[in-house]
Structures are given as structure tokens and as C-alpha cells.
Amino acid sequence: MDVLVYIEHLNGKIADVSFELLGKGRELADALGGKLDAVVLGGACRDLAAQLGKADRVVCVGGLGEFNPSAYKNALADVMANRAPRVTLIPYTSMGMELASSVSAAMDLALVSFVNNVAVEDGQIIATASVFGGKMFAEVECDGAVILAALAGSFSADAGKGAGAPQVEELQAAADGAGIAFKQMIQPEAADVDITKQEILVSVGRGIQSADNLELVEELANALGGAVSSSRPIVDNGWLPKARQVGKSGVTVKPKLYLAVGISGAPEHIEGMKDAGTIIAINTDPHAPIFDVADYGITADLFDVVPALTERIKAGSA
Amino acid sequence: MNIIVCLRQVPDLVEELEVNDDGTDLNRDFLKYVVNEFDDWALEQALLLKEAHGGTVTVLALDQPEVDNSLFTALAKGADAAKKIEGDSANGVSSHTAAKLLANAIQAMPHDLILTGVQSAEDLDGQVSALLATYLGVPHVGVVTGVEISGNTATVKKELAGGVMAEFEVTLPAVFGIQAAKQAPRYAPVSKVRAMMKEKQIASESVSDGNEANGLKVRRMFKPASGQHAEMIEGDTDAIVERVMVILKERGILK
């Protein structure tokens, strides 16, 4: 019973989450007594394949340009039809999530999304998924072939890195990008502030309620000598520029201090900040998932605590 | 241009969630349901396109708890028609089943563009937008933050990580999984929603059962070991602030 891992790459670099899945895939393949295959669509595959030592075999599919949902789905489905893996691991990322669902429907294969753990128990595959915004975990029994779309940060990337000499097979994509043409990559606007370089971040979420209240958080950030960042909804509302967004579709940050203000802690946000040095979270909901990763938690009202903390810092040490 | 927006009802995540007696799903008895937030962004994108290009916006949903409210709200925001698909959806519907039912309904409706949210809280078995597109046999792009139309072609921006976006040209009809739009979802005053309830009808239909056995069985659902990993800081505002100051100094963040 073989395992197939989808290797996501951009601009010649393999995404860390792909190494996470490779490491986990190795463990599963060994437990199932099968082979570990890695599939790379497009890209300078031979170069990328050299980094996939943990795999037994690498399938390179050429004749594909940049990510194209139709073309990549068709190419991946062809490889899967050919290899018939028991488990296909795909990262739950912008590219991976739609590939996983499209291929699931096209091939009538079961799919579990938001996966953060996988185990083999008595020959049965159990996938754990983080659902309902991270408030619940579901243990799913996967009988038969299954696609698992896994959250970045679930497994060790180091476990997937390492030397090896996998067999490399090169294929050409059969079908084209039916109905979709890639036009260009658009880089983000030059950021006024690079939040990945900040030692102190005061990060704001929906709890701030309105753009006018952002002032409170900015003053605290200034008092601390840090910068303001945010969760996705703040950026989607246009209250802060995209460059300030922490999380799956923003950036990953590792500051010395991450002060989460009014952020609930959905998995996509946690992914971007869980490795910060010290995490202090303020949220009136005692069950907010942010408290699962925070070092310190405060359930008092941010509108009381934030200004009071700013004043205290400005007043200097006692 | 005929735009269809698919709405899905999901448990309100702001509320306390409990597991049912079986331990295999949420206890859905007293749950409050709301429209999936990303579907609301999809509706906003549809209304913006209608304002720019004309055409009609039809909202489509499975008959789930409190869906009428969501459909009438959509009409109040400017949708032209609302339709719901009858069936036994009270206990949550898998994404695969939802997508199959929606595809069956959409096949019988004029459709140039189908918009729905990028993901939802009920997505244990994947995302409706991509499943739906595949069942319909049309192109799909997900995580879309901008849609422009010119004739039979849509130009969309797909968000990747770190603020980078990929731009695609897509031949219609197509399905897009919407993450955000140029402006936040508009408001519909309660009075307008009530007016819609008096003036408009929600069309209703049954479609052939699309129950997709998805080969998955939830053996256990549980609240994550409230890894209440966090040390909670108690007390009044002053006490909290003092404790934070101590922590910041101990950790070398403040001198």
C-alpha cells in the first residue's frame, strides 16, 4: 500500500510543508509496508528531485508551466490513476486545497481536509482533522484509498529532509489547462513595514470591531517599540494593508513577542505565528483557540487592558 | 450574464460548540446557524459584477436551518432571485453531497458564472467550490480576491502565500471560490429583509439525491485537549497590566 506526496514548489523553492508531508509520508509508507512516491508538477524537476531523498520514487511531470488549476489537476489525476496510492498527501495551501478537492471529485476518491495528524492503527488509517475553525477535532477512519489535505505546521519538516537516491521517472503532461490560462504573478506592494523582521508585534483581529479603534493598538505597538500586524479579516476589510497579514495567506512571523489582541486563533492564523517567542493573547472568549498556543491568556476586555498597558509602559519601569 | 451564488449555512462559531451523545458530530440541537462568511463575500462579488455589467444574480442553497433568513437577506442586498433545494439537511451535509446537489440544480439553470466561498467550517471532506466545478465539468479557481469580466472571459486573482497573487484568464462558465472582494459585504437593513419576506418568494425544488457516500467515518469528534496551554492572567485591569509588565521584563522584552 503506497503513499504519494504532492510536492508544492514556487520559484524553484520547495515549500516547507512539502517536507513535512514527505516526512510523515515516509512514516506511513513504512507502517503500511509500501513505497513512498513524490510527485512534482512542472518546475526544474531534476533539481527539485535531488532534495526529495526520503522518497523511494519521484515522478516529474513536464510540459506544465506555472500553477494552473486545470492542467495541474489533470496531471495529478493521471499520476494517481497510474500509481493508485492508498494515501495521497497534499498540503492544505492555496494551490493544494483546490487540487485536493478537484481530484477527489474527478476520481471519486475520499478526501479529508484540515488534517493535522495521521496514524496507522491495526492496519487502519486514522486521520485527525481540525474543523469548525479549530474548535473541534475529528478522528476519521479512512477505508480504501484516500486523499489527505494537511495543514502546514502539523508535522516536522526536518523529518522530510535528507539525502537519498530516489528513482526519478519523467512524464509529459497529457492534457492542457482546459479553460484556464496563467497570465502573470503579481508581487505584493513594497511593504512600509516588513513584519517578518519585527521583534515585537501587536496583532489585531476582529475583536477590535472598527478601523477607528486601530489607534489603540498602534499606540501600544509604538510604546513597545514594535509594529502592528493582523489576522485576515482586518486586511480583507481594507483596514490594514496586505503586508501586515499574519497567517496562511499572509506571512509567517517569529517575533520575540506576539501580542494577539481580539484574535480568535483560527488554524490559518495560528499557522503564521505559533513559533513566536512569547505569545500573550487577549480575548473575551475563554474557549478561543488562540489560548491553545498562547503562553499567557487574558479574558478581560481589550478596550480596558490595551490602553492601560500602553500608559503603564510609557510611564516607565517602577 | 447569469450569476449564481451558492450559500451554505454553518454553525455560528462564536457560540459554544458541544459534541453529540454519540461523540461523532456536533450536537446540532440548539445550534445557531449563519451563512458561511466567505459565501457572503461571494455574494458581494456577484453584486459588484452585476452593477458593472448587468445581468442577474440568483442565490442558491440547500434547505438547511435558518436558510430562509440568509436567502431573504441576499434578496435585500440586491440578488434577483432565491432558490432552495429541499432535502434532509438538518444535521449538516458533507461538502461532496452539497456539491452534487448544487450541481444537479445548476445544470437546469442558466449559468455563466458560479461564485461561492473559498471554504467553510463544515469542510471536513473538502471545499464545495472545487467539487462543484468538477461535477459540472467547468474550470475552477479558488482563493480568489478579484474577478473581472470581459465578454466570455473572466480575469481572476488567486492569492498564494505572502501576498503574492497569480492572475488567470478563465473561459466561462466557471466556478470561483471567493476569499475576498474589492469591498466588504454590504449591509441589508432588517427592515429591507422583512420587506423581502413579504414581497418575494423563495423558489423550492427537489433534485435527485446526490448522497455521496464518501468512504469516511468519523469515529470520534472532540474538543482539542483544551491545551489550555496558556497561563491565564486574572484580576482587575491594574493587576493584569502589572503581571504583563513583569512577564515582559522577565523575558527581556522590556528593560
Image (tube, coloured by chain):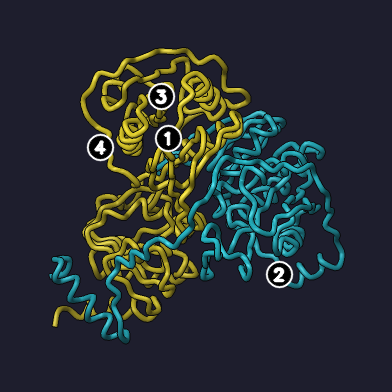
Per the rendering, the colour in which chain A appears is yellow
Which residue carries the number 1 mark?
A89
Mark 2 belongs to which subunit? B
Q: Are marks 2 and 1 in contact (CB under 8 Å)?
A: no
SS type, badge 4: helix
Which residue carries the number 2 mark?
B189
Please determine if labels 2 and 3 lie on a single subunit: no
In this rendering, the label closer to the viewer, 3 or 1? 1
Q: Amino acid at mark 3?
A: Val
Q: Is residue A314 above or below residue A18?
A: below
Q: Is residue B220 left or right of residue B114?
A: left
SS type, badge 3: strand
The disc, 4 or 3, on the residue closer to the chain's N-terminal end is: 3
Residue A318 shows in this picture:
yes
Residue ID at (70%, 65%): B188
Residue A246 at x, y percent in the picture: 37, 53
Q: Nearer the viewer, residue B14 or A65?
A: B14
Which residue carries the number 3 mark?
A39
Residue A46 at x, y percent in the picture: 32, 17
Q: Is residue A237 above or below residue A149?
A: below
